[in-house]
Image (cartoon, grey):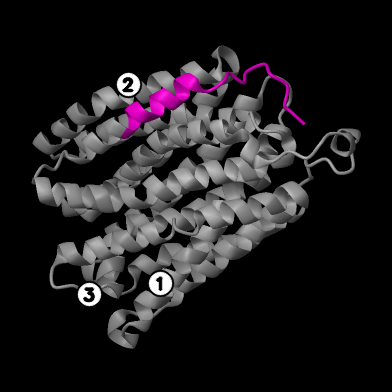
């Protein structure tokens, strides 16, 4: 049952983040501009468009999951992400169909955002509701671990493509291959999700006798949760930007840039599970807070080292360090938030929290750091964005209630 959630979640994030890894080539294919920077900025801006519909997907699909069930909601998100990926994989270039090309790509990103916005709440709720006693942290950490798996696979395929194809071939058609691979795996995810059990309780005595719960009653929890999410979100998308950063800013070979994504994926997968295991033993708050605080401290020195020593080894070391800290903290966060909501609004509460945090900060991160590098002339400028948002997140983490050992509220 965990496999159905993990594989489906990984596939959805794979399709979504693959865009980030190939932003340089997608920008040149669909967004013509007078300069390479202008094309890249347009491309990463459209990456951000995919976050606009996340709150809508979170509200609509999250509420659907709380009313009808986790399984039908998770099947719906797979369908939406499929439609979005088809649009990206099959759309002709700007040179072929003119302005229809960017219009279709924007629409595809909006549909992908709708599906992914509705994925987090139901999948997180399912994982912690199906966990044995004392293992909610470990089970829930598969939410972030699956995202690491998606990053690993997307980066691995990107690395393979960049090593066997010329830059001209990558631009002409090579960047489409990872999207096609994702489409081939979607039937597997659909099959597994159709067979998964349902963890939403229907018609129970609790549900029949307790007054309805409204999301508005948990406004403080949502606000604190958004603060918690924003720190990990910015760090995550800075990590996902490493490929573009390595190619466009550090002037490293495309294969080296793609390999950094593989490092991020491996680190996220491994350290997310470590974070889940730890938060079952020492609590959610310390595992959320201390790695995030450490990330605030080390980000700028790490980026300065990377700028001064523009080697593959330094790139991989910095990527691994930041991804590890983000994964440990993020895994505990994605457990701590949904377990504090009552079951009847758990999916929609988590969806709204995550979607707002990611829509406001995740969608803008790549555009902001690309712009910061240009206007400041400082290649280490992304680190300041990580530092500031991490400090804000630490405040939210400190004020969050501790959920370890607490029974899930019905």
Q: Residue at label 2?
A: 294
Q: Which residue is mark 3?
A: 32
**Residue 322 image-quadrant placement:** top left
Residue at the disc numbered 1: 105
Sequence order check: which comes first, mark 2 or mark 3?
A: 3
State the extent of the magenta-drawn residues as a range: 389-410
Disc 1 to disc 3, how far (Cα)? Answer: 14 Å
Find residue 392 and report its horizontal and vertical position in percent: 36, 29
Q: Residues within 10 Å of mark 1 (few under 14, many from 20)?
A: many
Please give the name of the residue rendered at 16% of the width and 38% of the height, measured from the top-left corner.
380
Whole-percent x and y of residue 257? 26, 49
- Mark nearer the N terminus (1 vs 3): 3
The image shows residue 39 at horizontal and vertical percentages of 22, 67
The answer to whether residue 401 is magenta is: yes
Q: Is residue 180 visible?
A: no
292, above or below 11, in the image: above
Residue 15: x percent and y percent? 47, 58
Query: In what quadrant of the picture does the C terminus appear?
Result: top right
Q: Is residue 359 above or below residue 207?
A: below
């Amino acid at each position: 049952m965990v496999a159905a959630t993990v594989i489906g979640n990984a596939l959805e994030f794979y399709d979504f983040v693959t865009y980030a890894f190939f932003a340089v080539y997608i920008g040149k294919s669909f967004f013509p501009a007078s300069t390479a920077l202008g094309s890249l900025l347009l491309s990463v801006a459209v990456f951000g468009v995919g976050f606009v519909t996340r709150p809508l997907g979170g509200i609509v699909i999250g509420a659907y999951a709380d009313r009808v069930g986790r399984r039908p909601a998770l099947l719906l998100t797979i369908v939406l992400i499929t439609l979005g990926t088809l649009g990206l994989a099959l759309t002709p270039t700007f040179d072929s169909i003119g302005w229809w090309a960017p219009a279709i790509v924007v629409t595809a990103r909006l549909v992908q955002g709708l599906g992914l916005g509705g994925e987090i709440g139901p999948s997180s709720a399912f994982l912690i509701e199906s966990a044995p006693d004392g293992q909610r942290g470990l089970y829930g950490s598969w939410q972030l671990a699956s995202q690491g798996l998606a990053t690993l696979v997307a980066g691995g395929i990107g690395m393979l493509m960049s090593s066997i194809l010329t830059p001209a071939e990558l631009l002409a058609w090579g960047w489409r291959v990872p999207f096609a691979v994702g489409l081939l795996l979607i039937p597997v995810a659909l099959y597994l999700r159709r067979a998964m059990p349902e963890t939403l309780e229907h018609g129970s005595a609790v549900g029949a006798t307790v007054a309805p719960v409204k999301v508005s009653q948990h406004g403080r929890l949502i606000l604190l949760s958004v603060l918690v999410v924003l720190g990990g979100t910015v760090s995550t998308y800075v990590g996902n930007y490493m490929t573009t950063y390595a190619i466009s800013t550090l002037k490293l070979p495309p294969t080296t840039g793609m390999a950094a994504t593989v490092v991020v994926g491996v680190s996220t997968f491994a350290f997310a599970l470590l974070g889940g295991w730890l938060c079952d033993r020492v609590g959610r708050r310390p595992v959320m807070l201390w790695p995030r605080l450490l990330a605030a401290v080390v980000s700028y020195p790490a980026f300065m080292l990377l700028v001064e020593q523009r080697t593959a080894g330094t790139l991989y070391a910095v990527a691994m360090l930041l991804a590890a800290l983000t994964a440990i903290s993020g895994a505990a966060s994605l457990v701590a938030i949904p377990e504090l909501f009552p079951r009847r609004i758990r999916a929609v509460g988590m969806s709204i929290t995550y979607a707002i945090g990611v829509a406001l900060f995740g969608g803008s991160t790549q555009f902001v750091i690309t712009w910061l590098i240009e206007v400041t002339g400082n290649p280490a400028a992304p680190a300041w964005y990580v530092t500031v948002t991490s400090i804000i997140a630490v405040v939210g983490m400190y004020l969050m209630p501790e959920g370890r050992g607490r029974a899930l509220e019905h």
